[in-house]
Image (cartoon, rainbow, N blue to C red):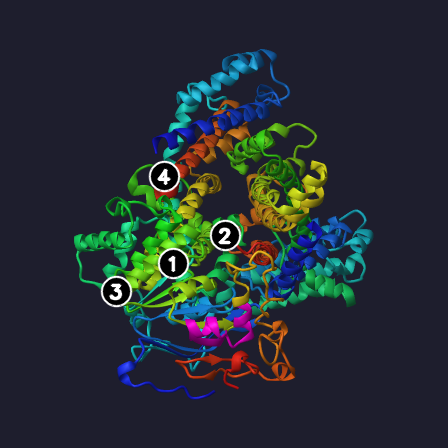
Amino acid sequence: MFDLPQRTASEQPVLSVRHLSCSFKTDRGEVRAIDDVSFDLAAGETLGVVGESGCGKTVTSKSIMRLLPEHLSFLGRDSEVLFEGENIAFAPPERMREIRGRRIAMIFQEPMTSLNPVFRVGWQLCEALKYHTELDRAGRRARAIEMLQLVEMPEAERRIEEYPHQLSGGMRQRVMIAMALCCEPDVLIADEPTTALDVTIQAQILQLMENLKSKLGTAIMLITHDLGVVAQVCDRVLVMYAGRVIESGTVHEIFHTPQHPYTRALLDSIPKSGERAHKTRLPTIPGIVPSLFELPPGCRFQDRCPLAEDRCRDREPELLGELHGRRVRCHLPLAGGPR
Amino acid sequence: MSGRLKQFFSQRGMRKLRQDKMAMGALFVIGCYLILALFVVAHLPSPEAVVMRVGPDNIPGVFGTQTAEKRLSDAEFRLEALQRAVRTNDPETSLAEFRMGDLRILAGTPKAVESRIEGGWKAFEAVAVYDDIEAEAVALELLENLESEVAALFSPPTGFTALASFLRLSLGTDRQGRSIALRAIYSTKVAVQIGMVAALISVLIGTLLGAAAGYFGGWVDHLVVWLYSIFSSIPWIVMLMVLASMFRGSRFDGGLIPVYAAFCMSFWISPCRVIRGEVMKLKELEYVQAASAIGFGHLRILLRHVIPNTAHLMFINFSLLFIGAIKAEVILSFLGLGVKDEPSWGVMINHAKAEVLNGFFWQIGAATAFMLVLVLAFNILSDALQDAFDPKHV
Amino acid sequence: MWSYTARRLLYNIPVYLGIVLLLMLALRVNDPANAFLGKNANPEDLLLIKERLGLDRPFLVQYFDLLKSVFSLDFGTYSWANEGITVGRMLRESVVPSLSITLPALILTSTVSITIALISAFFRGRRIDRALMVLAVVGMSVSFLVYIVFGQYFGAYLLTRETGYSFFAIGGYESGLANWPYYCLLPVLISSLVAMGYDTRFYRAVMVEESGRDYIVTATAKGASKRKVMFVHMLKNAMIPIITRIMTTLPFLIMGSLLLEVYFNIPGMGRVLYKAIQEQDFPVIQIFVAIFAGLFILSNILTDVLYALVDPRVRLS
């Protein structure tokens, strides 16, 4: 393991993750779902985390919030989740409760199931306020309505009396966002917030998140497998594959000079409008993500990599580069990355 | 496609099941009970041995203790039995044919035997004068003396017979002096029989009706739902009592047929419900749609493609209904509606009611233990089956 | 809400008509009058007894007659075995003893098993959870009858012998609240103990399933404590299947209390029916079974309505 550069206090990021790893207990033994994930999230920044399904994006976000089931999962011993300098990876439950919802909030993929079906929308909105603020009943209600108006929910006053099943998917996701933002958290983790929605609604929700970010100055960690979304809203990107970070950099760097063959393949598989788009077959990545139970020695992408050599099969490459600049985990980076 | 899907289910489920040590243990236990039931069917132990008197009533099992008074009356019982054998018209044969379990009378002329019995009675009277035998050491000594004299009247079994005799008395005797161990073992047959027949028929009926309802929908579905709503609205115990009165006087009266009928009438409902739901889901799957698009007949699709994919549910339901039948049999025996001419755990527990008030637990204990192990094994198996094949089930 | 209730009622009417039809047919397979009087009955007596119950009328007439008496709750027919006593009176006299066992047993079983299930689900995967679940499986593998036999021995017999004070009756029944603990508490305790194993496991499974849902994660992410998540978010959702379960056990409790009533000599509905069947008391059997089935269906409807009350998705659709 290499030393990560220490930052000075003035530019300390709001959230720093170091060597985060998380294992699950399964019928077939323990399996490490994410391994040695490190990154920083600066205040006001939007970080995109991309990768195919099953690559560990959601586990990363839930590990940060410590939302994984306790009896089935555990964090690696040297994992660090530094929130404003405090390591919360092993903080006691009481401390986590103060942070969750108040300092770090989260939006989930499935707006259909993420809201409690038997409580009114208003009650669920007020719940976080009840835990984290001194507001009285009327104050909480007023704040809930205010938040719903902020997320552009029509007829907010009527909606808070309704149950989740009476709302459409887009409206539910707006409720989720309002719920996450009502205590003005420093960090918002959005786990595929638009995946389950219609395309038109997707655009609205993304626009909404953009607006709110500029209004409230919240740092956002946006988890998605949709590179289009990343290009639209993110400042920096973290690419994950089979539980590992394989590349990171600014949106510009990743989209224009991808260094990992996997990133490259991901970008190639986006349909582009314009020349010859309809004439050529869209390239796909052959094969599937290796099972975490049967990881090959060496690079985890070797079986699907067009450039793989012998050393890729023998030794896993390290993640080279600066934590805040480019990083890539490859023996043969494209476009002259760090070797 | 159907075959492949089936394979996928069976492979994943079976592998998970095979890795489950508890489930494998449970299967082993169930296997042992099945073998035991087969032995009973092959008349080992024989039906005669099960009703034979092997000693005084309510003697405890090997690790049990009994009061001095009970020991005295047991000695008295043995002496009386011998005396009855001697005082027949033909003492020679009756002595030679005398059996108390595996005990025979020590060889000798009737005269010699009679005089020895006389000696036994004297020893008996010496003890009987004490009101409270346990309180006085002398009395206890005399009691032991009496017991050894009585024992000396019999020729102890040897070799294999000794082992058999030990096992036979290992759990004591019931109120008629019959071996509890043998009866408990024999009852395995009735339990397995009732469980097998009731669960099998119920699962078959339930599967066929449920699959038809789920697959065809429409009026078939309405009819089946109406039917199971009706049958599930009558508690099975009430249904059974009605059936018993229905069969009264007919040639099925007292047999197992009304029992089976009552069990099946209420047991088919739960597999039917579950499989109807599953088939409704399966019907929407591509391969079933494809099969019907190709033009396969409904019957063929149902039998070849739909029902085989509900096999795991059939197994789970079979296992659960087996438990239901065994437990229900006990309740029936208590109500006097169950098995009549053979021993069963229900009959044993029912007979043991009165013994318990006298502090004699061997019969109820043995029946409960035999039943507990089998039902527990089936419970564990059901859980494991559910885990392996139907993990989302509550 | 009201239209929902009405729809449930309407749906169950054909079911009930079917039950009564089936029941009446089953009871007429053997001529009831013959069965009651025995083989050597006087033909005049037979005719008399048939006439008194109208068994000589066409089946359909009898069918509507029974339906009418059930729906108007008017059971004026006389019992055969108990001269001069109407079935209605037997019913009235047996309802209270039955309820004084069934209701407390239902409440006790439900509260205790839901509490145990909550503890188990709260400490999921820990030693206490596993111990409780092993206990539950073993508990549900023992026969009802064994619980009754041992319950009576230890509770009524041994306890009295050892303490010299009779806490519980060996059997029997007397009305009045003051007599309730003496006659009914022991059967209630036994009945709860029997149901506990299965119920606890079921409730725990429901809770575990609910604990795995997305909204639980959402609530935790909002900063709710584990206790809040379990007791507020999870429990209210789990109440939906729990209520269904409690209601569906109701008829089984009636059945279970039949055993207890017979064993402890409590003159409840179960015991009346049991005796009627032994004595071939046809009018009593017919009406009591029809009532049992009716109660079952009513409890089904009640389940659906309660279900709707807890689940806004059903209520508002």
User: Callout 1, which amino acid?
Assistant: Ile
Residue, x 56% and y 64% (percent of image)? B65
Mark 1 and mark 4 in contact? Answer it, CB < 8 Å.
no
- Horizontal side, residue B190 vs residue C264: left or right: right
The residue to which callout 1 is attached is C216
Location of residue A303 in the rendering, given as x and y in whole percent from the top left corner: 63, 73
- Horizontal side, residue A176 vs residue B263: left or right: left
For marks 4 and 3, give the CA distance: 39 Å
User: Callout 2, which amino acid?
Assistant: Val
Local secondary structure at mark 4: helix
User: Callout 4, which amino acid?
Assistant: Arg
User: Callout 3, which amino acid?
Assistant: Leu
- Sort mark 1 into few (<14), some (14-19) or many (20+) by Cα contacts within 10 Å: many
Q: Chain of mark 3?
A: A
The residue to which callout 2 is attached is B394
Kindly indicate whether the residues beneath marks 2 and 3 are on one polypeptide chain.
no
Query: Magenta span covers which residues?
Result: A244-266
The residue to which callout 4 is attached is C315
Q: Is residue A265 magenta?
A: yes
Mark 1 and mark 2 in contact? Answer it, CB < 8 Å.
no
Local secondary structure at mark 2: loop
Q: Measured along the vertical axis of the image, is residue B203 above or below residue A244?
A: above
Q: Upstream in the sequence, badge 1 or badge 4? A: 1
Q: Measured along the vertical axis of the image, is residue A3 above or below residue B367?
A: below
Q: Nearer the viewer, mark 2 or mark 3?
A: 3
- Sort mark 2 into few (<14), some (14-19) or many (20+) by Cα contacts within 10 Å: some
The residue to which callout 3 is attached is A216
Mark 3 and mark 1 in contact? Answer it, CB < 8 Å.
no
